[in-house]
């Protein structure tokens, strides 16, 4: 039976490498960063909404103010006219006009007061969201740093595993490596495993007594393979 112990070493490194890839793709730091970014985006959205609302409120205040300037001008004009009219019916009509404009002006003042209060509230909320954005930005920065740190650890680990793999692989016959590579491409579980008792460490199934004794009778050029999962076995 061909000795496969060196391949088992290689398999252990390859298993560690694929676990590392999985770990790197599923780092908790990624989730933390994604959540921090989402919170920041939400807060920025809220800030934009409040800013737009404040602008609209201020625009409405200035249009009310210019409407009231027109009202003032009209009241002044009618009051001036009132001084010169003689006919009581005309005077009455002018007074009625003045009353109407005054009512309009007063309604505008009420609206403006409400809008001023709304604007003040919006400004307060805006200040709070700005503070929140600053805090959340700092959170994103530290989450980014934490992720980069975690990725660096993975990279270092990969580098050392790659070096170890190179050392182990260079000591193995290239024909054997080829067989191992072919076997590996056909499966997701270990291509080489040993037995713990009668249990294959790739598929974790027990080999029967008959299967075990068949393995022991293999010729010098033959490979031991698991009858259940077909991996190479180190017996
Ligand atoms: Zn197996």
Image: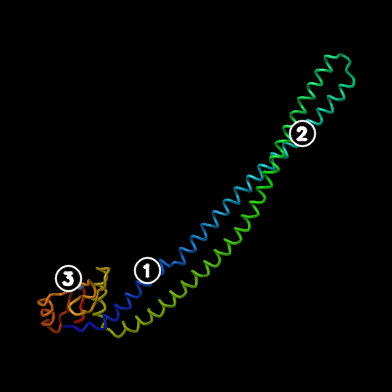
188 on left or right of 117: left
Q: Percent position (x, y) of residue 133?
A: 60, 58
Q: Percent position (x, y) of residue 26?
A: 41, 66
Query: Which residue is found at the position 62% from the left and 48% from the top?
Result: 50
- Asked whether mark 3 lies closer than 8 Å to ligand 1, one says yes
Picture quadrant where residue 196 is located: bottom left
Q: Residue 68: which numbered mark, if any?
A: 2
Disc on the earlier residue, 1 or 2: 1
Element at badge 2?
helix
Instruction: Name the residue carrying label 1.
Output: 22
The quadrant of the rendering that contains the C terminus is: bottom left
Query: Which residue is found at the position 22% from the left and 79% from the top?
Result: 194
Disc on the earlier residue, 3 or 2: 2
Element at badge 1?
helix
Above or below 13: residue 59:
above
Q: Give the distance between the C-alpha atoms of the residues marked 3 and 2, in whole angstroms.
A: 91 Å
Locate ligand 1 by image quadrant.
bottom left
Disc on the earlier residue, 3 or 1: 1
Q: Residue 228: which numbered mark, if any?
A: 3
Numbered disc in front, either 1 or 2? 2
Above or below 103: residue 146:
below
Classed neighbour count for the residue bearing mark 1: other residues with Cα under 10 Å, few (<14), some (14–19), many (≥20): few
Pointer 3 with pointer 2, Cβ within 8 A:
no
86 on left or right of 223: right
Classed neighbour count for the residue bearing mark 2: other residues with Cα under 10 Å, few (<14), some (14–19), many (≥20): many
Picture quadrant where residue 207 is located: bottom left
In terms of depth relative to the viewer, which is nearer, 80 or 166?
A: 80
């Amino acid at each position: 039976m061909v000795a496969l112990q060196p391949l088992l070493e290689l398999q252990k490194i390859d298993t560690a490498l694929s676990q590392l890839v999985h770990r790197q793709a599923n780092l908790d730091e990624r989730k933390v960063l994604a959540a921090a970014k989402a919170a920041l985006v939400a807060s920025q959205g809220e800030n934009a909404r409040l800013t737009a609302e404040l602008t609209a409120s201020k625009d409405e205040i200035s249009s009310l103010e210019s409407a009231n300037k027109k009202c003032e001008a009209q009241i002044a004009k009618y009051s001036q006219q009132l001084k010169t009219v003689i006919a009581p019916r005309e005077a009455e009509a002018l007074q009625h006009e003045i009353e109407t404009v005054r009512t309009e002006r007063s309604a505008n003042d009420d609206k403006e007061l409400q809008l001023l209060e709304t604007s003040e509230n919006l400004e307060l909320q805006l200040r709070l969201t700005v503070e929140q954005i600053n805090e959340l930005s700092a959170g994103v920065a530290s989450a980014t740093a934490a992720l980069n740190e975690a990725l660096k650890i993975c990279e270092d680990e990969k580098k050392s595993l790659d070096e170890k793999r190179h050392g182990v692989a260079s000591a193995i016959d290239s024909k054997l490596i080829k067989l191992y590579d072919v076997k590996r491409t056909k499966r997701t579980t270990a291509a080489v495993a040993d037995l713990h008792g009668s249990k294959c460490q790739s598929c974790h199934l027990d080999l029967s007594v008959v299967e075990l004794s068949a393995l022991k009778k293999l010729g010098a050029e033959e490979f031991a393979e698991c009858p259940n999962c077909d991996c190479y076995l180190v017996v």
